[in-house]
Structures are given as structure tokens and as C-alpha cells.
């Protein structure tokens, strides 16, 4: 008999239920712990986050596909963005894009 370790959680992100945030933007909430929350967003072409996103904790995202325009920068696949607590942004896309994000929970 093998014992599965309880210090790892694995999921297939595309199998997580997609919830529409606003028309054209869907979110998948990924595994969360006491230290961080994970999520994946898909933006349809021509969409913009509905309001300015203000961070109460550190937030990071990785552009997986497409291109985001965020704070005047064009961010293509492979771009890794880190926002400090208290910062804000409002991402948008002309092409459509997918991002994987992590929010670091202040302790």
C-alpha cells in the first residue's frame, strides 16, 4: 500500500470550472492555501478588466498566450509581472489573452 503525501495538490487548470466575470472574461480559481491564491483568466479579444484593480497584497501574473496591455506596456507570452501591495492596474487586450496569477496573502 502506498501513502499519498498530503503536502501537494495537483489539478488540471482547464478542468476547473470557468466563471464569467464580465462578458468576454472568465476566471478559473486554482488551488488556494493560507499563503497564496491562484487563478487563471481568459480575456476575449477587445476586453478590459471592468474596474481598476487595487492590490491589498502582492500580486503576480504570467502571460501564457496572447497579449495584454497593462499600464502602457504590451505584454506578450512569457511576460511575468509583479505588483507591490497598494499598486493598481487595469489590464486589457486587443488580441485575446490568457494569464496565470498568484496573489501572495499578507501574513
Image (cartoon, helix red, strand yellow):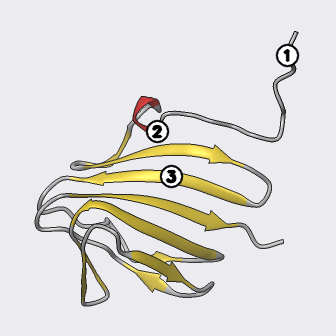
Question: Disc 2 designates what residue?
Answer: 13
- Residue at (47%, 84%) from the top-left corner? 88
- Mark 2 vs mark 1, foreground winner is 1
Q: What label does residue 106 carry, if any?
A: none
Residue 61 at x, y = what percent? 46, 68
Secondary structure at badge 2 equals helix
Which quadrant of the rendered structure holds the C terminus?
Answer: bottom right
Query: In which quadrant of the rendered view does residue 3 lie?
Result: top right
Q: Residue furthest front?
A: 1
- Mark 3 vs mark 1, foreground winner is 1
Residue 20 at x, y = what percent? 34, 42
Q: CA distance from mark 3 to mark 1?
A: 31 Å
Question: Disc 3 designates what residue?
Answer: 39
Residue 12 at x, y = what percent? 49, 34
Q: Relative to 2, is 30 above or below?
A: below
Secondary structure at badge 1 equals loop
Which quadrant of the rendered structure holds the N terminus?
Answer: top right
Question: Disc 1 designates what residue?
Answer: 2
- Toward the viewer: 28 or 62? 62
Q: CA distance from mark 2 to mark 1?
A: 26 Å
Amino acid at each position: 500500500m502506498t501513502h499519498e503525501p498530503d503536502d501537494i495538490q495537483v489539478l488540471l487548470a482547464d478542468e476547473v470550472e470557468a466563471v464569467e466575470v464580465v462578458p468576454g472574461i472568465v476566471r478559473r480559481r486554482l488551488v488556494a492555501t493560507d499563503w497564496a491564491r491562484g487563478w487563471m483568466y481568459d480575456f476575449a479579444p477587445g476586453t478590459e478588466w471592468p474596474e481598476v484593480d487595487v492590490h491589498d497584497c502582492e500580486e503576480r501574473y504570467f502571460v501564457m498566450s496572447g497579449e495584454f496591455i497593462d499600464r502602457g506596456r504590451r505584454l506578450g507570452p512569457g511576460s511575468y509581472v509583479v505588483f507591490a501591495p497598494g499598486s493598481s492596474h487595469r489590464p486589457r487586450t486587443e488580441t485575446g489573452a490568457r494569464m496565470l496569477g498568484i496573489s501572495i496573502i499578507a501574513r
